[in-house]
């Protein structure tokens, strides 16, 4: 299996990094996690064929994780895609995904390929392919503020545990606080991928000591934080387990 960091930037648009997107490739199934604004261009730059993506899973609907889906979907149509595509999102967000695509005049009926949608619930196990399973859990990244309580949008953000060809991977994406690092604490993970914008580096290190994953990949990197994170890794005693992710980085497991 292979993990490709397609976009490793934060919510701030950067000239150095694309917004969030990660590709998990396993035995003929390519699962894209998030499609932040600009993901189609990021994939193009990495030589990844849009039409080889089998499914797209979303952590949450902020623009840096979701804003690129309409453009990516459009590219699939323009590039003559014929194979089916599956969107995977929280079941309460299915309507919003469809509305968003329809607002850009992208309708499944005219895509030229079959589009399926899986709406998940937190805490259940889902099978993406023969070798990819995941469990979604709600994290605290998106909270409905009092003044927004009448907005008809589900305020939901997910973290995921993946089992890919027996490898155990946790991907936190954007979280609310350090407690969200422990959502899958009972699982001894091989690869732990966490964002770095909404959590302190020392809290990530504490979680690493408790959870003991084999490797930690730090992503969602703000330009202003990049040097701070790189220096922090350099100064760790046992720093070989920590990696600052970069766009285009590929892990082969
Ligand atoms: Zn983000």
Image: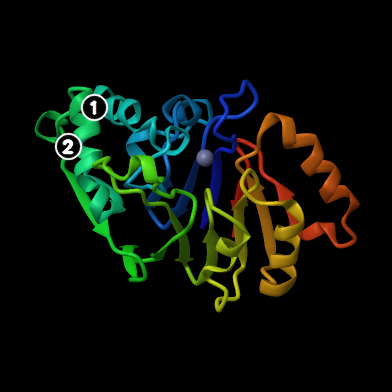
Would you say the beta carbon of the disc 1 residue lies within 8 angstroms of ligand 1? no
Give left or right: position of 196 versus 138: right
How far across and how far down the image is residue 9, in percent?
Answer: 59, 34
In the drawing, what numbered circle is on residue 207? none
- Residue 37, above or below 83: above
Choose between 226 and 43: the one closer to the eye.
226
Image-quadrant location for residue 248: top right
Q: Of label 2 and label 1, which has the lower sequence position?
A: 1
Would you say the beta carbon of the disc 2 residue lies within 8 angstroms of ligand 1? no
How far across and how far down the image is residue 117, in percent?
Answer: 21, 50
Which residue is identified by label 1? 77
Residue 129 visible in the snapshot = no
Residue 228 visible in the snapshot = yes
How far across and how far down the image is residue 215, in percent?
Answer: 69, 62
Whether pointer 2 and pointer 1 mark residues with C-beta atoms closer than 8 Å, the reply is: yes
**Residue shown at 54%/33% (left/top)?**
11
Give left or right: position of 36 versus 174: left
Choose between 25 and 145: the one closer to the eye.
145
**Residue shown at 74%/66% (left/top)?**
206
Which residue is identified by label 2? 113
- Residue 33, above or below 78: below
**Residue shown at 44%/28% (left/top)?**
37
SS state under label 1? helix
């Amino acid at each position: 299996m292979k993990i490709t960091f397609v976009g490793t930037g934060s919510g701030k648009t950067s000239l150095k990094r694309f917004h969030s997107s990660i590709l998990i490739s396993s035995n003929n199934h390519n699962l894209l996690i998030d499609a932040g604004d600009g993901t189609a261009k990021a994939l193009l730059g990495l030589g990844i064929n849009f039409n080889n993506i089998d499914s797209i899973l979303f952590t949450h609907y902020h623009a840096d994780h979701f804003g690129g889906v309409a453009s990516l979907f459009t590219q699939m149509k323009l590039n003559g895609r014929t194979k089916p595509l599956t969107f995977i999102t929280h079941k309460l967000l299915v309507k919003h995904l469809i509305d968003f695509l329809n607002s850009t005049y992208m309708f499944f009926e005219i895509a030229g390929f079959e589009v399926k949608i899986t709406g998940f619930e937190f805490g259940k196990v889902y099978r993406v392919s023969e070798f990819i399973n995941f469990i979604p859990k709600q994290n605290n990244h998106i909270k409905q503020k009092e003044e927004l309580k009448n907005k008809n949008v589900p305020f939901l953000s997910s973290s995921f545990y993946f089992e890919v060809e027996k490898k155990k991977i946790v991907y936190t994406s954007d979280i609310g606080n350090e407690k969200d690092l422990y959502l899958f604490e009972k699982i001894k993970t091989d690869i732990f991928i966490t964002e770095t914008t909404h959590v302190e580096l020392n809290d990530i290190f504490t979680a690493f000591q408790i959870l003991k994953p084999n490797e930690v990949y730090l992503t969602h990197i703000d330009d202003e934080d990049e040097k701070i994170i790189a220096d922090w890794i350099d100064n760790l005693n046992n720093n070989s387990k920590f990696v600052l992710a970069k766009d285009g980085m590929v892990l082969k497991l």
